[in-house]
Image (cartoon, helix red, strand yellow):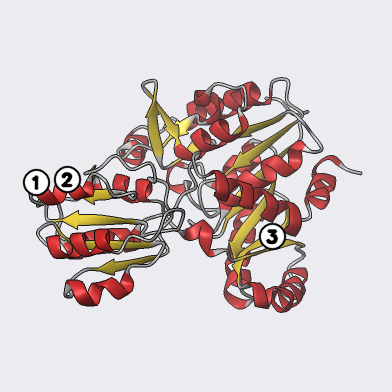
Amino acid sequence: MNSVTPRVFIAATRQHDGKTTSSLGLLAAIQKFFPRVGYIKPVGQRFVEVAEQKIDEDTVLMDAVYNLDCPLVAMSPIPIEPDFTRKYLESSNYDALVRKIQNAFDRVAWEKDFVLCEGSGHAGVGAVFDLSNARVARLLNAKAIIVTRGGIGKPIDEVALNQALFEKEGVEIIGVILNKVLPEKIDYIADFARRGLKRRGLDLLGVLPHLPLLMQPSIEVIREELDATFLNDSKQVFNLVDDVIVGAMSAQNATRYFKPGVLIITPGDREDIVLAAAAALPGKGKESLAGIVLTGGIRPSPSVRSIIEHLPYPVLLAKEDSYEVASKVHDVIVKTRPTDTKKISMIRDLIARHVDVEKILRSVVGD
């Protein structure tokens, strides 16, 4: 396996701690020093079908944003399908999986100056089939960065657990990135987290402020989650949702919630609320609702559908009742998509401003 190209492995203490966000921003930051950067996510748990191949969705994102000039199957060599673990435990094929990862890395690293490797959760994820993140980092001969949520006590406790497994595998940890810290607490958290990490022999590489925009789902993401259909041809499918209101009150009372960024969830036969929302449209050039989800699979009458067709924001029709729809929207996992250009720009700026990228590179390639 290639042992020359510099590389770094991005891990996290838990899922959804900001590993992909950090990877997305770090790749752009590293490109300023090493123009040809490769990317690999050796083990992926959430995948999509691309040309009849199962590709990790983070790999699709990275390739779409950075045009990495490498086959997707090399950047996402092992997708964990629902029966993957059972099959592995029945007939272990560890050596074949290791060869697959290392061969994929060689393809990714071909003619590249640097390779960013992204893990799939905390250090132990994948241990059931002998490919924990810590083990994969060792197989790739990569130093690791741990991303964790902001705070002092709990994050450092969780870092210590991950550190133990990385060190057992002989993987050096470059340092830690704290994510989602309240802006007004950044200096305070950074000071004490740095002290706590130093006691464990670790460096604090950066503290990322919590930005609500990065956690807001778009209407298109919600549509996918609900498997809903559009009732109009709005161009605003990437509207971000700031707040969600379930329209179970009278139309008159509902109007006070008709604000920019609000998603209204209401049964399909509550035509009074739909008409009230249409009547409350702001003037031209001003922001309106993020959208409306009509529930219960109930289509409005033809006259109301005609009005819906001319609304500027998306109106969706979902099969489930309002409670189920509201629960799904509440639980939606907000992943950055290639179309989230505003978020991607913000993430790049976030990493450039708040993470010591030069320190990371010195740890990997030397001064």
Q: Answer yes or no: do the residues labelled 2 and 1 have beta carbons within 8 Å?
A: yes
Q: Label 3: how many residues lie within 10 Å, few (<14), some (14-19) or many (20+)?
A: many
Q: Answer yes or no: do the residues labelled 1 and 3 have beta carbons within 8 Å?
A: no
Choose top left, top right, bottom left or bottom right for residue 253: bottom left
Residue 260 point in image, percent of width and height: 41, 63
Nearest the eye: 108 or 164: 108
Q: Residue at x 20, y 75 (%)?
A: 252
Q: Is residue 41 left or right of residue 272?
A: right
- Mark 3 sits on what residue? 176
**Can the viewer see residue 307 in this picture?**
yes
* Labels 3 and 2: the sequence-earlier one: 3
Q: Residue at x 57, y 63 (%)?
A: 211
Q: Which mark is residue 234?
A: none
Q: Label 2: how many residues lie within 10 Å, few (<14), some (14-19) or many (20+)?
A: few
- Mark 2 sits on what residue? 306
Element at label 3 = strand
Specify the amino acid type for callout 2.
Ser
Residue 138 point in image, percent of width and height: 65, 41
Q: Which mark is residue 302?
A: 1
As measured in the structure, the alpha-carbon distance from the residue carrying label 3 to the one carrying label 2 is: 54 Å
Element at label 1 = helix
Residue 86 point in image, percent of width and height: 31, 40
Residue 61 point in image, percent of width and height: 52, 37
Q: Is residue 10 left or right of residue 55?
A: right
Element at label 2 = helix
